[in-house]
Amino acid sequence: MMDEANESREETGGIAEAVRGYYGETLRSSADLKTSACCTTEAMPAYLRELLGKLHPEVKERFYGCGSPIPPALNGATVLDLGCGCGRDVYLLSALVGERGRVTGVDMTPQQLAVAEDHREFHARAFGHAHSNVDFRCGDLSDLAALGIADASIDVVVSNCVLNLVPDKQRAFAEILRVLKPSGELYFSDVFADRRLPSELLADPVLVGECLAGAMYIEDFRRLLAELGVADARVCARSTIAVNDPAIEQKIGFAQFTSITWRVFKLPLEDRCEDYGQVVTYRGTLAKSPHRFVLDDHHVFEAGKPTRICGSTADMLGATRFAPHFRVVGDKSRHFGLFDCGAETGTTVPQGCATRCC
């Protein structure tokens, strides 16, 4: 048992050093990446593109994310960005939470955090804040307690193509759920594989740094969440990752990789779409989304239009920070069996959605 524990620690330490080396020394800008795994393919909303134009050029140049995991309704929120790197998303979030909010960025690469720290006052001035509303902490994403992040202290956790780099993923997601407030949200983008990958690939610093060797098999991720009490996680966006480098294709081309943006709430949800006869109407009151609200890749709510929903969707909209923007009619006092998602949403429904919304 002692030998296994030592091997695990050595593997974890080796991965951590590979990540620090790749992101702290090998990569100088996003142009140095060899695949599209760490490049944003999801379209960024116009209001975020406008804010992006206010960021310091060095912060934008050294961005290595794989999506746009910045949810709406953040004014006044306390947000945690895991794997914040040089702080691009932290500073976008800084503008969105406003001076009443707070954003903390966590990363394990000192060189990246040094870039982020250098530009704190620049961004406070750019967004018209009297004082910076961000702070940065260097450490292990799977040990947030060691960084002083308390239980139930965070409204929203975001992460952009980083959790694949964490060796102990179960511990990392358990820590996320620990620090989230009840009804808080994890909204993150990461790389997932269509199969379990050989552990020996983790010895390749390029495959690790390019976010491929640590990618989780998507079904194992679903099982991990279930073990942690998350019964219903929603996919918000997905895109196929291109492996264009011949050497990397030779090593890992047997698998297919996808960038997926997930929405996970700290709520006691059901693992099936259950019908309680509930109806929701979006009020159209989110400033950046006056006409429709997108909950996930198959739930889009038009302003003013009553829509039948399952019990878990009702809780996601009516028991979270989104509640002021929705009118939910009905409760769970009467049950009508399984809810057919496709019959009511009028959108293309993923396979299996008639019995579960994730």
Image (cartoon, rainbow, N blue to C red):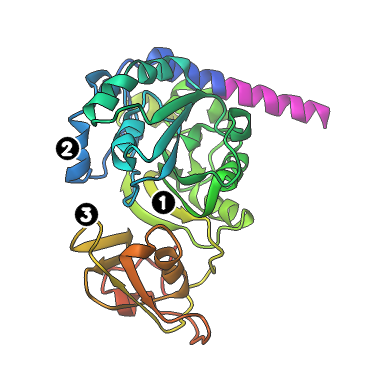
Q: In the rendered structure, which amino acid carries the disc numbered 1?
A: Trp
Quarter of the image holding residue 13? top right
Badge 2: residue crowd in 10 Å (few <14, some 14–19, many ≥20): few
Q: Distance between the residues labelled 1 and 2?
A: 24 Å
Residue 354 visible from this viewpoint: yes
Q: Which residue is outermost to the top?
A: 25
Q: Position of residue 358 (x, y in %)?
A: 44, 62
Element marked by disc 1: strand
Which residue is label 2 attached to? Answer: 50
Residue 162 relative to residue 50: left or right? right
Measure the C-alpha gap from mark 3 to mark 1: 23 Å
User: Residue 262's x, y, as percent?
Assistant: 41, 51
Under circle 2, the secondary element is helix
Work out whether 81 lies above or below 45: above
Q: Bounds of the magenta span?
A: 1-15
Q: Which residue is drawn at 67% across and 22% down?
A: 10
Location of the N terminus (image quadrant): top right
Tell me residue 214's x, y (percent): 51, 35
The residue to which callout 1 is attached is 262
* Residue receiving disc 3: 287
Type of residue at label 2? Answer: Glu
